[in-house]
Amino acid sequence: MIVKESFLQKLRQAFNLNIYEVKIWTALLSRGISTAGELSDISEVPRSRSYDVLETLEKKGFVIMKLGKPIKYIAVKPEDIVSRIKKDVQVKLDKKLKTLENIRGTNFFSELEKLHKTGVKLVEPSEFTGSLKSRENIYHKIHAMLENAKESVTLVTSAEGLARKHNLLKRNLKRLKEKGVKLRIVAPITKDNLDIVKELSKFGEVRNTQRINARFVITDDKEIMFMVLDDKDVHANYDVGIWMNTPFFSKALIDMFNVVWNNLEDGKRVIAKLK
């Protein structure tokens, strides 16, 4: 049986298995029921390891051992495996969330808050900067920035970034509107993203640009996330963002941005023209 390496790698990531486990499992899936020796030959996993691997897969719920001589193994349906894993993940997640929520009301959490607030007074403002690598980490930080925003959010992005932010930050943007936070968005508006622009216009004002090639978020004129690379040229895993909590620089950037903002075309007019 020949299975592409790329397919095996996807299985490893999706099901948290090692390479021998995915080879034995896919071999068994192709047979339905088989012995350890047969699976070793098909998967090219050393016979000395195949029994250990099958024992591990049995514990993880991927195979069922059929008693008899010789011992055979039965493949569990992928659908059943996915359902079980989803249930296990949900149970663990619910437990973790409950634990985190319970921490908020404890003396332990109060001490953490006190420690942070006391320590912040001793830190130089220039220390409140940091770099984040990978788009996932960048968006986690942007999510936190939007959650904490109280007055204003300015978001400048690419056409592709607009689609990503619509998908990943929609709930945040909705909450901003509910809290009365002023939201301004600038991005290239094209025929391909008209529906997204319409949706985002419900939460704030969207304006069109075909010249500004930048990606940044500013909240309350004091906190900035600035992406330093063009998202067209960098893989998501290697994207880099610079985070700064500096009212002086943020206010200066906002003052310059306001000059540009006043000369940008309103998104609703662009939508009307492109329809």
Image: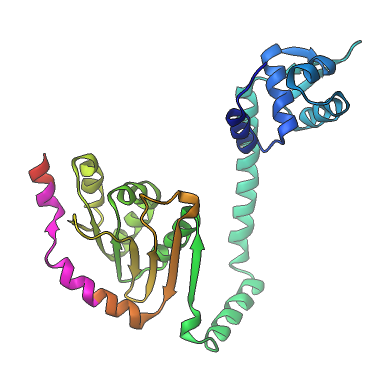
From this view, report whether residue 124 is shown above or below residue 191: below
Q: Is residue 152 left or right of residue 55?
A: left
- Seen in the picture, residue 76 relative to 245 is either above or below; the reply is above
Q: Position of residue 64 (x, y in %)?
A: 78, 21
**Tag count:** 0
Residue 44: give x, y in percent of width and height: 76, 22
Q: Nearer the viewer, residue 55 or 91?
A: 55
In the image, farthest residue toward the right: 69
Could you say where residue 164 lies in the image, as x and y percent from the top left?
Answer: 36, 48
Q: Quadrant of residue 208?
A: bottom left
Q: Front-most of 51 and 153?
A: 51
Q: Main secondary structure of the magenta part?
A: helix
**Quadrant in which the C terminus appears:** top left
- Name the residue at the front extreme: 233
Report the residue at 63% width, 78% height from top. 111
Q: Please report the bounds of the magenta region as a residue range.
A: 255-270
Along the line of sight, the residue nearer the viewer: 57 or 256:
256
Residue 62 vertical placement versus 223 (above, below): above
What colour-coding does the image apply?
Answer: rainbow
Q: Position of residue 78 (x, y in %)?
A: 63, 23
Q: Quadrant of the N terminus?
A: top right
Residue positioned 48% across, 58% down in the render: 140
Does 260 lie within the magenta span? yes
**Residue in view at x 15 percent, y 53 percent:** 267
Tell whether position 248 is magenta. no
**Residue drawn 51% across the image and 81% down it:** 127
Quadrant in the rendering for residue 149: bottom left
